[in-house]
Image (cartoon, rainbow, N blue to C red):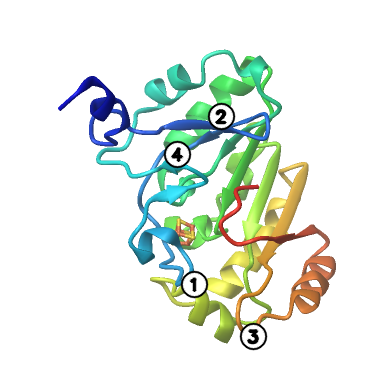
């Protein structure tokens, strides 16, 4: 294999961090709680905005912190890859704590199912370590949520909303998001649910990292 091939081979040189919009994005896992029908990895590709996010092994907290380098170079450090970062909650919190101690602003893009999969309310554990949560709501009811996101556990839609409700007591900025154009999804109804819960709302564009 040539040096150039090795450089782009995710098995040899995985993309653990990538830079977009002045932020440093962290790709710490390939595991997901959802199997979203619109996800690139369930449609034969691990590429997002030109970055091959396939991981063959998951990086340690030390490796992730090393990858970031000086966090002052970025507006935000964002946990967001082709896997759900809260499946590795211990690593996420360890990295967040170390980077926050160096002055970083930490955002987690999540499916909001951390409490469901870990079997406890994890929202208090985010306090002082996570500045912002962007939670994928993706639908205005559980039927559509299940159709588009195909969760591995039951009760995902309600668990995601409950997580958003609880997290706002511990995380300064909580935003629910929905993707524009998913069949049957009423974006205005999603926005209304976010307002009822008392968190912000953002309309997303499919395949754009935000
Ligand atoms: S949560 Fe994200 S990475 Fe996981 S299946 Fe859905 S779109 Fe893909």
Q: CA distance from mark 4 to mark 3?
A: 30 Å
| Mark 3 lies on residue | 184
Q: Position of residue 84 (x, y in %)?
A: 46, 51
Q: Which mark is residue 96?
A: 2
How many C-alpha atoms fall within 10 Å of the one at disc 4: few (<14), some, or many (≥20)?
Answer: many
**Residue 8 drawn above or below residue 73:** below
> In what quadrant of the picture does the N terminus appear?
top left
Q: Which mark is residue 149?
A: 1
Q: Is residue 59 left or right of residue 191?
A: left
Q: Earlier in the sequence, mark 2 or mark 3?
A: 2
Q: Earlier in the sequence, mark 1 or mark 2?
A: 2
Q: Please name the residue shown 52% across and 15% down the image.
A: 69
Mark nearest the camera among 3 and 1 is 3
Q: Nearer the viewer, residue 101 or 123?
A: 101
Q: Which mark is residue 104?
A: none
Q: Position of residue 106 (x, y in %)?
A: 64, 33
């Amino acid at each position: 294999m040539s040096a150039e091939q090795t450089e782009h081979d995710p098995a040899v040189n995985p993309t653990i961090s990538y830079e977009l919009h002045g932020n440093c994005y962290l790709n710490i896992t390939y595991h997901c709680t959802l199997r979203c029908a619109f996800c690139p990895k369930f449609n034969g590709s691990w590429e997002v905005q030109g970055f091959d996010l396939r991981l063959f092994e998951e990086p340690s907290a030390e490796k992730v912190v090393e990858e970031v380098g000086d966090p002052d170079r970025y507006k935000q450090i964002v946990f967001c890859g082709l896997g759900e970062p809260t499946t590795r909650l211990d690593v996420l919190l360890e990295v967040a704590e170390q980077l926050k101690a160096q002055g970083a602003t930490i955002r987690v893009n999540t499916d909001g199912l951390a409490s469901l999969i870990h079997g406890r309310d994890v929202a208090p554990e985010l306090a002082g370590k996570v500045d912002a949560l962007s939670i994928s709501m993706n639908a205005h009811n559980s039927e559509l949520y299940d159709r588009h996101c195909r969760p591995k556990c039951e009760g995902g839609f309600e668990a995601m909303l409950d997580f958003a409700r609880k997290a706002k007591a511990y995380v300064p900025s909580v935003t629910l998001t929905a993707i524009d154009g998913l069949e049957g999804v009423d974006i205005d109804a999603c926005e209304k649910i976010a307002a009822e819960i008392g968190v912000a709302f953002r309309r997303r564009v499919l395949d754009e990292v935000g």
